Image: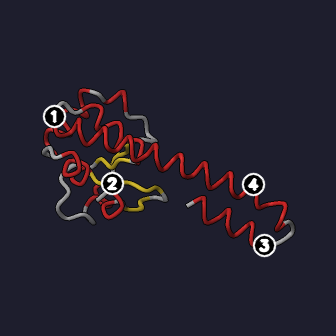
Amino acid sequence: MIENSMKTIWGKRVMLSSDVAKLYRVTPEYLHKQLKKNIDRFPKEFMFKLKPKALSSFKEEKFPHVFTEQGILMVGGSLKSEQAIKIHVQLIRYFVQLFNQTLKDVSLLKKLEPHIKGEKIFDVLKEMFKK
């Protein structure tokens, strides 16, 4: 669900408030209530507001906040519902697994580098793993 709900806005991969609320199975109103209570947990690299013109592109969206991957995780730690806590734990496991896989991939690239030195293949592979 996360991948399907991610959008690219201003060069950042983000998720709309309504989609984050669906992810954690809470109402958007409850999500924003908790957001206001815990606003100090959300620096600009975790969450930002859309301007009214940008928000109008998303017809059903009532709230102007969008969340980066870090913000999506932080939201889960701010919600009190039992279901949100379960999902938050699953997401942390997922992101840790992704991080560990990325480390393995980087390690593999470093091992391959001496064998393909001077070739553009290495640059292409590095670009692929950055995404």
Q: Earlier in the sequence, mark 4 or mark 2?
A: 2
Labels 1 & 2 near each other (Cβ < 8 A): no
Labels 2 & 3 near each other (Cβ < 8 A): no
Instruction: Report the Cα–Cα distance between label 2 and label 3.
Output: 34 Å
Would you name the residue on which mark 1 appears?
Answer: 82
Would you name the residue on which mark 4 appears?
Answer: 110
Q: Earlier in the sequence, mark 4 or mark 1?
A: 1
Would you name the residue on which mark 3 appears?
Answer: 120
Q: Nearer the viewer, residue 97 or 24?
A: 97
Residue depth check, mark 2 versus mark 3: number of the one nearer the observer: 3
Q: Nearer the viewer, residue 120 or 31?
A: 120
Q: Earlier in the sequence, mark 3 or mark 4?
A: 4
Q: Position of residue 104 (x, y in %)?
A: 61, 51
Residue at the (23%, 35%) spot, across then down: 85
Residue depth check, mark 3 versus mark 4: number of the one nearer the observer: 4
Helix, strand, or loop for circle 4? helix
Q: Position of residue 42 (x, y in %)?
A: 38, 34
Helix, strand, or loop for circle 2? strand
Instruction: Report the Cα–Cα distance between label 4 and label 2.
Output: 33 Å
Residue depth check, mark 1 versus mark 2: number of the one nearer the observer: 1
Q: Nearer the viewer, residue 118 or 44?
A: 118
Q: Residue furthest bottom?
A: 120
Q: Earlier in the sequence, mark 3 or mark 1?
A: 1
Q: Position of residue 101 (x, y in %)?
A: 54, 51
Would you name the residue on which mark 2 appears?
Answer: 15
Displayed quadrant of residue 129: bottom right
